[in-house]
Amino acid sequence: MRRNLSETCSTFFSTLANPTRLSILELLYEGPKNVTEIAKTLKQEQSLISHNLRLLERCRFVFSERRKKERFYTLNKETIEPLLKIFGYHAKKYCPKKGKCLTQQGLRQQRKRTASAPLYLARQ
C-alpha cells in the first residue's frame, strides 16, 4: 500500500459502516432524492438524514444540487454505484440468507451445485 492509503481506507469504510448511511446510498441508487423524501422513506428524523448526508457528501459518496429551495442528492455513479453492485453480488453469492454469511460447509455445497450445473445456468 502506498503512504496514507490506510487512513483513507479507514475513513472510507467507517463512513460506510453506518446502517443509516448505507440505507441512504441504497435509496439514492434508485435516483435523486431530497432530504424530505429520504427521511420519509427511511422513517427517520430529517435532522439525522441531513447529518448523514453531510458525511456522505464530504467523502463524495453523494453529490448535491440545489433546485430552487431544495437540495437533491444523487449517488456518485462513477465509484459508489459499481461498489454497491459488487456488494450486491457478494451478498447474493456468499450471504444468501438475509445477510447471514455462508459457513464453510455451505460454501462447499454451493460450489458443488455450481460445478454440477450446466454451464449456461452457472453464469446467471
Image (tube, rainbow, N blue to C red):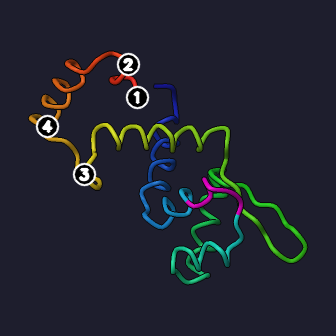
* Helix, strand or loop status at disc 1: loop
- In the picture of the structure, the residue carrying the numbered disc 1 is 124
Between circles 1 and 3, the one closer to the viewer is: 1
Q: Which mark is residue 23?
A: none
Percent x, y of residue 96: 28, 46
Q: Compute the Cα span from label 4 to label 3.
A: 11 Å
Residues under labels 2 and 3: Cα distance?
Answer: 24 Å
SS state under label 2 = helix
Q: State the residue position of label 3.
A: 97
Residue located at (70% from left, 56% from top): 74
Is residue 30 covered in magenta? Answer: yes
Give the number of the mark in front: 4 or 1.
1
Residue sitting at 39 percent across and 23 percent down? 123
* Residue at mark 2: 120
Q: How many marks?
A: 4
Instruction: Tell whether 51 sits left or right of 92.
Output: right
| Residue count near mark 4 (Cα–Cα under 10 Å), binned few <14, some 14–19, many ≥20 | few
Pinpoint residue 20: horizontal percent, then vertical percent: 48, 67
Gap between marks 2 and 1, in whole Å? Answer: 7 Å
Label 2 crowd (10 A; few <14 / some 14-19 / many >=20):
few
Looking at the image, do the residues carrying marks 4 and 1 touch, with CB atoms under 8 Å apart?
no
The magenta segment is 27-32
How packed mark 3 is, by other alpha carbons closer than 10 Å (few <14, some 14-19, many 20 or more), is few
- From the image, state whether disc 2 or disc 3 is nearer to you: 2
Say whether marks 2 and 1 touch (CB < 8 Å).
Answer: yes
Residue at the spot x=62%, y=39% of the render? 79
Q: Secondary structure at mark 4?
A: helix
Give the Cα separation between the discs numbered 4 and 1.
19 Å
Q: Amino acid at mark 4?
A: Gly
Foreground pick, 123 / 101: 123
For the C terminus, the quadrant is top left
- Counting residues from the start of the chain, the first of labels 2 and 3 encountered is 3
